[in-house]
Image (spheres, grey):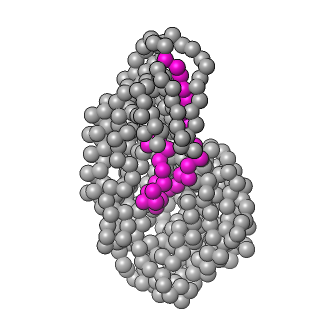
Amino acid sequence: MRIIELFKTITSIPRCSGTHQPFIEFIQQFSSQYNYICTVDLANNILCHKENTQATLCLQSHYDIVCLEDGKIPIIIEDDGYLKAKDSTLGADNGIGCAYMLAMMQDGYDCEFLFTCDEEIGLIGANNINLSLHSSYMLNLDSEEEGSICIGCAGGIDIFATNNNSQLIPNNQKDLYEIVVDNLDGGHSGVDIDKNIPNAIKLLAQTIKEYDVDILDINGGQRINSIPKSAKAIIASSNPIATTNPNITISKIDTKTQHYKKLDPKILDFLYIFSNGVRGYDNELNVVLSSINLAIISTNYDAVKIELSARSMDNDELQILTKETTVLLDYFGFEVTTSGKYPAWKPMHNDFTTKVLDIYKKHNPSVKLEAIHAGLECAIFKDKYPNIQICSIGPNIYFPHSNNEKCEISSIDNIYKIIQDIANAV
């Protein structure tokens, strides 16, 4: 299948968030080969279109992918009807969308093709875009469920907290232990937040809290938009530490020390009591209303840093959730900042969604309009290009942002036919 071959081609190009130039150079060469003009803005977004274009439709995908290991190129395998990756994220989010756009360019469609950067680390490309679009409609290709048309999404904000209250104390005959939580499933902190996936940082805190110990070092989580699948800590204890959990390993450290830096006990208290996960549900939209994910914790010298990702389908609810979390962190001795805020995309039915729905029904009569509890760039584009009507579709992608990510091969082909029909109709 041509889409899969194109996907494999771009998967060989480094595209972890924050890496731009290799893909930009590829698109510049690709667009020239198929007679498209290619423009790159200062934020590293890419826009391709024909000379003297009459395009009414913009196809849009972000080109960065979540890499649980920086710089790791996914090794793609086909298994039982799915694309998977060996020991890494697959990058179907949003590499398949990019592959669709490349195929449409090969087929000579007079569309605008917008590739945005750094979506996975705060929608940075979309927030800083400086490209003129002339289309009346935008079809975002970053959805992950065949049979649905997304017309709304959650807004979000990233919360960063630092605690510097460590102290050097004498070792009163305590032994050192390393506690490691590993091999959890992980997942997307938005669309997977209601699937009861264990959070490695929370599990680590719950394990440590069973004992009277001092924490010397604690680290966990991979990306701010992923449910952490691993975490570890070094602790000092007067009593032996043990567990029966198969995902937790406890090892005694032979090294002896006369003094050690003890982290603020309030850090563990916060991790233990913090209510991670779903905070509210919207029964009308049948989607999570608000949630927050304890994503990353790291120890650097005498400072412990925590990163959290808050989401809500309602901008006022997002503000309340952010304030509550900030006050709680402050109470437990953290200095708090926020960044990466993006608005919720209020569900909206319009002429374009009607056209897309009618076309989609010819391929899948049970297709539905929906909103999702994840951040899509559509919310930002709606603010920056207020006259453009937007919706989002995509193939079946399961467990994005994790080593278990997979994409259904038959679904890839189904969605491409729908994209072609939409482009021919508008």
**Residue drawn 46% across and 37% down?**
207
Up-down relation of residue 86 to residue 102 (above or below): above
Q: Is residue 247 above or below residue 266?
A: below
Which residue does the image show at 46% across and 20% down from the upper left? 238
Query: In this rendering, is residue 299 above or below 73?
Result: above
In this rendering, position of residue 67 left or right of residue 311: right
Q: How many marks?
A: 0
Looking at the picture, tell me which residue is in the foreground, 57 or 256. 256
Q: Is residue 182 magenta?
A: yes
In percent of the image, x 56 and y 44: which residue is there? 247
Identify the residue shown where x is 38% and y is 48%.
Answer: 276
The residue stretch that appears in magenta: 174-202
Q: Position of residue 84 (x, y in %)?
A: 67, 61
Asked whether 267 or 146 is in front, the reply is: 267
Q: Horizontal and vertical percent for residue 158? A: 40, 46
Q: Nearer the viewer, residue 130 or 359?
A: 359
Residue 168 located within the stretch drawn in magenta: no
Q: Is residue 93 visible?
A: yes
Q: Position of residue 304 (x, y in %)?
A: 43, 30
The quadrant of the rendering that contains the N terminus is bottom right
Q: Position of residue 317 (x, y in %)?
A: 27, 56
Q: Is residue 197 left or right of residue 402?
A: left
User: Which of these two is toward me, 266 or 67?
Assistant: 266
| Residue 55 versus residue 320 in the image, above or below | below
Q: Is residue 377 visible?
A: no
